[in-house]
C-alpha cells in the first residue's frame, strides 16, 4: 500500500469536507470521522504490525505527522468558525450611541426627612448631639420617668398602643431624654435632639395621624435658663419659616416641664397681620416646650439643686404642613409620587 498517497488523498478529502462545515458541532463530528478510533487513519496504523521491523518507525512517523496536520486543519477551521460566530454576535449587539436614551426620574428625599435633615443641620451647628431611641418603649420611660405615674390624668393627652402591659409604641420622643440622662449618669451636661417616629391612638384626619414624626430637644446643665430656651426656639422658627419671624410663648401644661409653654410663630402668610391660615390671630402654634421638671431630673439621676434644663418637642408633619401650606397630613403617608416630587 502506498501510504503517502493514501494519506494525501485522505488529507485532500478532509480539506474538501472542511469547506462545507459551518458549525462547531459539525466540526466535532468531522474530527471524529478523521481522527477518532474508527477513523481511516487509526485503521492504517493497524497495518504497522504486518510491516518488517525496519519499516515500522518511518511508517509510524508518517502516520503521526499526518495526524498532526489533520488536527491543525481542524483547529484552524474551529478558530475561523469561532471568529465568525463572535463577529455575528457583536454585529447583533451593536450599540447606537447616537440614539436618545430613555430618561429615568431620580427619586428625592421625602419631605419629612428633608425637614429633619434641616433641623439636624441647625442643631449640629449649635453643638448638639443627635440621639435615637427605640419605637417600642417601656411604660416607665415613656410615662413614669417623665412625671406621669400610672393613672395620672394627663396620660389621656397621649392615647397609646400597648404591646404588653409594660411596653408600648412610644407616644412621643421624650423617653429619649430619659434614656440619655440615665446614660450620662446624672454627671455631665446634656445637649441633644432626638428625631423619630411616634404613635398615638388618634383617629386619622386632616391634621392627625396614628403615626407621625417628632423632634425632641433637651439641654441640661448648671446655667440653662428660660431665655436660652426662647433663643433656641426662635432659631427653629426662623430656620423653618424665614429670618424675619417672631415667636411668642404662651403658658401651657406638660407634666414633664415646669413652667411649660406653647410656642407660636408669626404667620408667614400675612406676616402677623391676620389671615385665614392663622385664623386671624397673626400667629401659628408650632411646638410645646418648657423647663425640665425637677422630678424628671431627679428620677434620671440629676440633682435639681445643681442642674436645670429645657426641653421642647415639635411635630415634623406640622412644621412641613405650615411651611408648604399642605392641607392634609395623609399626603405624607399615601405615597402619591406626584405629591412627593413637588419637594425636590
Ligand atoms: C408632646 O408630645 C411633648 N412630648 C412635647 C414636649 C417635649 C413638650 C418636651 C415639652 C417638652 P404634644 O402632645 O403636644 O407634646 O405633641 C407635640 C407635637 O406633635 C404637636 O405639636 C403636634 O405637632 C404633633 N402631634 C401630636 N399628635 C399628633 C397626631 N396625632 N398627628 C400628627 N401630629 C401630632
Image: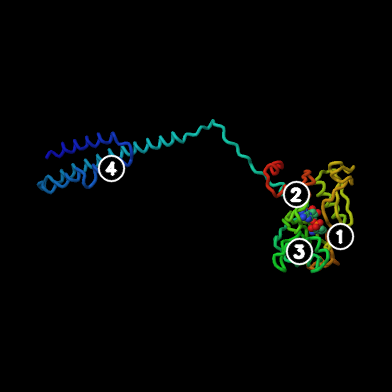
User: Disc 3 designates what residue?
Assistant: 142
> Residue 138: where, in percent of width, then height?
72, 66
Up-down: is 248 above or below 23?
Answer: below
Label 3 vs label 2, nearer the camera: 2
Of badges 2 and 1, nearer the viewer stands 2
**Quadrant, the C terminus:** top right
Q: CA separation, marks 1 and 3?
A: 17 Å
Quadrant of the rendered image holding ligand 1? bottom right
Residue at which label 4 appears: 29
Per the image, label 2 sits on a secondary structure element best described as helix
Residue 53 is left or right of residue 226, and the answer is left
Q: CA distance from mark 1 to mark 4?
A: 93 Å
Instruction: Find residue 339 and name its label.
Output: none
On screen, residue 93 versus residue 238, left or right, reads left
287 vs 136, left or right, is right
Q: Residues within 10 Å of mark 3 (few under 14, many from 20)?
A: many
Name the residue beneath numbered marker 1.
253
Q: Is residue 53 left or right of residue 301?
A: left
Q: Where residue 254 sits: x, y (%)?
A: 84, 61
Answer with mark 3 or mark 4, whichever residue precedes in sequence.
Answer: 4
Disc 2 CB within 8 Å of nearest ligand 1 atom? yes
Which of pointers 2 and 1 lies earlier in the amino acid sequence? 1
Quarter occupied by residue 131? bottom right
Q: Earlier in the sequence, mark 1 or mark 4?
A: 4
Q: Residue at x 78, y 63 (%)?
A: 188
Amino acid at each position: 500500500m502506498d501510504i503517502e498517497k493514501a494519506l494525501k488523498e485522505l488529507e485532500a478529502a478532509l480539506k474538501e469536507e472542511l469547506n462545507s462545515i459551518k458549525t462547531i458541532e459539525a466540526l466535532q463530528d468531522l474530527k471524529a470521522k478523521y481522527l477518532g478510533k474508527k477513523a481511516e487513519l487509526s485503521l492504517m496504523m493497524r497495518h504497522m504490525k504486518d510491516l518488517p521491523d525496519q519499516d515500522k518507525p518511518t511508517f509510524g512517523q508518517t502516520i503521526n505527522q499526518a495526524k498532526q496536520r489533520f488536527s491543525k486543519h481542524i483547529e484552524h477551521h474551529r478558530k475561523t468558525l469561532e471568529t465568525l460566530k463572535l463577529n455575528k454576535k457583536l454585529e447583533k449587539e451593536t450599540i447606537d450611541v447616537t440614539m436618545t436614551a430613555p430618561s429615568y426620574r431620580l427619586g428625592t428625599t421625602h419631605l419629612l426627612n428633608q425637614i429633619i435633615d434641616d433641623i439636624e443641620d441647625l442643631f449640629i451647628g449649635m453643638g448638639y448631639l443627635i440621639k435615637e431611641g427605640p419605637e417600642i418603649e417601656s411604660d416607665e420611660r415613656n410615662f413614669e420617668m417623665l412625671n406621669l405615674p400610672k393613672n395620672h390624668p394627663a396620660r389621656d393627652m397621649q392615647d397609646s398602643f400597648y404591646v404588653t402591659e409594660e411596653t408600648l409604641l412610644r407616644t412621643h420622643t421624650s423617653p429619649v431624654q430619659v434614656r440619655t440622662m440615665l446614660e450620662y449618669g446624672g454627671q455631665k451636661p446634656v445637649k441633644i435632639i432626638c428625631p423619630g417616629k411616634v404613635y398615638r391612638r388618634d383617629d386619622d384626619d386632616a391634621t392627625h395621624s396614628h403615626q407621625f414624626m417628632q423632634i425632641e430637644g433637651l439641654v441640661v446643665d448648671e446655667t440653662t435658663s428660660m431665655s436660652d430656651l426662647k433663643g433656641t426656639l426662635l432659631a427653629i422658627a426662623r430656620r423653618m419659616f424665614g429670618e424675619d419671624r417672631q415667636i411668642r410663648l404662651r403658658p401651657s401644661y406638660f407634666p414633664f416641664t415646669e413652667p411649660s409653654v406653647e410656642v407660636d410663630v408669626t404667620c408667614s402668610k400675612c406676616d402677623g397681620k391676620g389671615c385665614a391660615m392663622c385664623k386671624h390671630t397673626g400667629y401659628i402654634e408650632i411646638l410645646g416646650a418648657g423647663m425640665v421638671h425637677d422630678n424628671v431630673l431627679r428620677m434620671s439621676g440629676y440633682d435639681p439643686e445643681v442642674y436645670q434644663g429645657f426641653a421642647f418637642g415639635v411635630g415634623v408633619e406640622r412644621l412641613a404642613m405650615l411651611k408648604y401650606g399642605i392641607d392634609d397630613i395623609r399626603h405624607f403617608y399615601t405615597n402619591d409620587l406626584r405629591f412627593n416630587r413637588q419637594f425636590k
